Image (cartoon, rainbow, N blue to C red):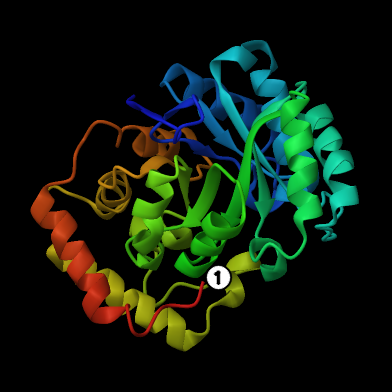
Amino acid sequence: MNYRPFGSTGLQVSEVGFGAWQLGNPLWGAEKSDARALIDEALELGCTFFDTAPGYSSGASEAALGEGLCKVRDRVVLCTKFGHTAEGESDFSAAAVRPSLEASLRRLRTDHVDIYLLHNPPRDLLEGRDPAVFEELERLREAGHLRTYGVSLDSRQELELMLRNTRCSAAEVLYNVFHQEPAGAFDAATARGVGLIAKVPLDSGWLSGKYGRGSRFEGIRDRWSPEVIARRADLVDKLRALLPEGLDMLEAALGFILASESISTVIPGAKASPQLRRNLAISGHALPGEVVRALRTLWERELRENPLPW
């Protein structure tokens, strides 16, 4: 496993992290013992970055990480979020920051988190119209309850607003082969010393190669219309045609993200050991430059002016 600095925060993170949104979710068949085994295996393979949130599996994701990591807390970097509660409600008020963090700390079995993110907050927060939230985050940082804070967001414009109007030193950005638009603000983030986390790196499974025109979806993934499914399937075919023999889609998708020196870590999810091992094995395997350029060209030609819905 290779490691990268998390901006100028002083943190070091595994370049491939553990996206824990699925832990404890009964829809994915993740038993408590399975979650613990995955966490143990990730640690054995050198993963040190774990990303979660109160809203993931109604708090069960945080609780699973708390159980699995409490004895190795000093070896890992924990990232959790604020704004969407374990009870399924949304509250981005300054008054809710401390209670939310304290609840997360109890589930995570720790006295601090390393990175604390606003979880896709309203635009007015990014525009600096409610400084009280960030003032409270700064107080919590000074008190030692968190090491750094930032925002989980989806677009270049949101990242630029965060950089312009806040003192955040962390951002979790929706960035993958099909969603390259945020990269336009990466240089500015790096210049500011902001650590960048790449979320949704496999486009909710499409870039792993397991979906196609005939795929059917349920749960959170039933958001795609038949037209969007057909378009994504067409893009997958075009992407696959660009890859040299021996390079599969998952390797290309994660390798493309890690080709950016601005990215500190990428957080694919995993439900089982083979999937986890494939994800973590990407570390240290640089994607050929011509493939990186071809994937950028694919986005420029097919998606820059006509982006996919999430």
Residue 32: image quadrant is: top right
Q: Is residue 84 visible?
A: no
Secondary structure under the numbered disc 1 in the rendered image: loop
Q: What is the three-letter code of the residue carrying label 1?
A: Phe
Q: Which residue is more in the foreground, 107 or 94?
A: 94
Q: Quadrant of the N terminus?
A: top left
Residue 164 x/y as whole percent: 54, 59
Residue 298: image quadrant is: bottom left
Residue 256 x/y as whole percent: 27, 51
Residue 141 x/y as whole percent: 72, 31
In the image, what residue occupies the spot 27% across and 72% down?
299
* Left or right for 90, reference 284: right
Q: Which residue is more in the foreground, 18 or 221?
A: 18
Q: Which residue is more in the foreground, 10 or 236?
A: 10
Image height of 37 relative to 199, above or below? above
* Left or right for 227, reference 234: right
The residue sitting at the bottom extreme is 227
Image height of 60 relative to 218, above or below? above
Q: Which residue is more in the foreground, 42 or 267?
A: 267
In the image, what residue occupies the spot 34% across and 75% down?
233
Q: Is residue 98 visible?
A: yes
Image height of 148 relative to 89, above or below? above
Q: Which residue is mark 1?
A: 217
Q: So how many labels did they put on this image?
A: 1
Residue 100: image quadrant is: top right
Q: How many other residues sit within 10 Å of disc 1, few (<14), some (14-19) or many (≥20)?
A: few
In the image, what residue occupies the spot 83% across and 45% down?
97
In the image, what residue occupies the spot 55% across and 29% down?
38
